[in-house]
Image (cartoon, grey):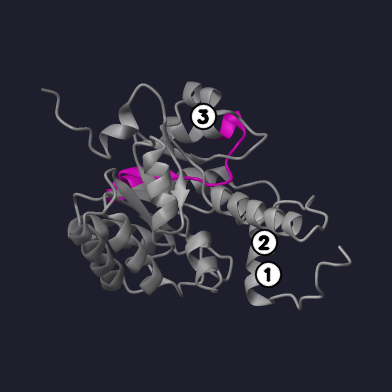
Amino acid sequence: MNRPQTFRDLHHGDGPLLLPNAWDFVSGAALAEAGFPAVGTTSLGVAAAAGKPDATGGTRDETLALARSLARLPVPVTVDIEGGFSTRVADVAELATELASYGIAGLNLEDGRSDETLAPLDHQTTVIAAVKRAAPQVFLNARTDTFWLADGEPDMDETLRRVRAFAEAGADGVFVPGIAAEEHVRAVVEAVDLPLNVLFTPGKADVGRLAELGVRRVSTGSLLFRKALHAATAAALEFAGADANVPAPSYTEIQTLISQPPVSGGVSGR
């Protein structure tokens, strides 16, 4: 009898792990029911559902509550913990231990900070090493935001320096959201002997091409949450007899909506 596939195994199959990201229990349950072999979380969805901005370290409690519920799913679950909700190494390691105790299979840990800077590399590698000592069974996907925070052309030298350092510190995978150009993807794949996670972006390289480039995991990030919010808004406008041809909200628009809720003027003039 073949042993069940672990979350780690899913990164080494015939093709990339296609990882959809949920924001509450029912979205995770629906994705598992749809046949996806694992489910992740989206920090934007978790924060927005709580009326809080994303990536500011303010959703530790909500993230833990969601993790406890998602651990009931029949598939492995990986949780986005932003930057660990603390700058203290011990706090992040303790968080990883708690999530592992629920049965969570993986963590996303990012180096981007709310002030749009990157965490010092030596600090980030210390955190990664501490998390792996505290919860060695958990698949740690170490994310660098060198592309997302780039002002103009991303710094590939810094990207490669960080993913190599993350690998040396004990990370199980690396994640570079925003990376899309084939030469950039190929460079990261060749730089580290770890699975590379790429964020799916409609209109960019498709999954088949990413697989050819050596990508081992493709996740949706906030895409599903934003599409769900768009579908709900359009359905409500259609119900009200108003123009339902509204665009899907961007990440930035949802962040703005949370910080500055619009004053309703009714739907009659739409």
Is residue 25 shown left or right of residue 149? left
Q: Decide: marks 1, 2 in contact (CB < 8 A)? A: yes
- Between the residue at mark 3 and the residue at mark 1, the CA separation in whole angstroms equals 35 Å
Q: Compared to 21, does 196 lie above or below? A: above
Q: Residue at x 40, y 24 (%)?
A: 15
Residue occupied by mark 2: 252
The quadrant of the image that shows the C terminus is bottom right
Q: Choose between 177 and 192: the one closer to the eye.
A: 177
What amino acid is at disc 1? Thr
Q: Earlier in the sequence, mark 3 or mark 2?
A: 3
Q: Choose between 147 and 264: the one closer to the eye.
A: 264
Helix, strand, or loop for circle 3?
A: helix
Instruction: Point out residue 267 in the picture as x, y percentages from the top left corner.
Output: 81, 67
User: For the image shown, how many numbered marks are present on the structure?
Assistant: 3
Residue 126 visible? The answer is: no
Is residue 139 shown left or right of residue 164? left
Confirm whether the magenta stretch covers residue 183: yes
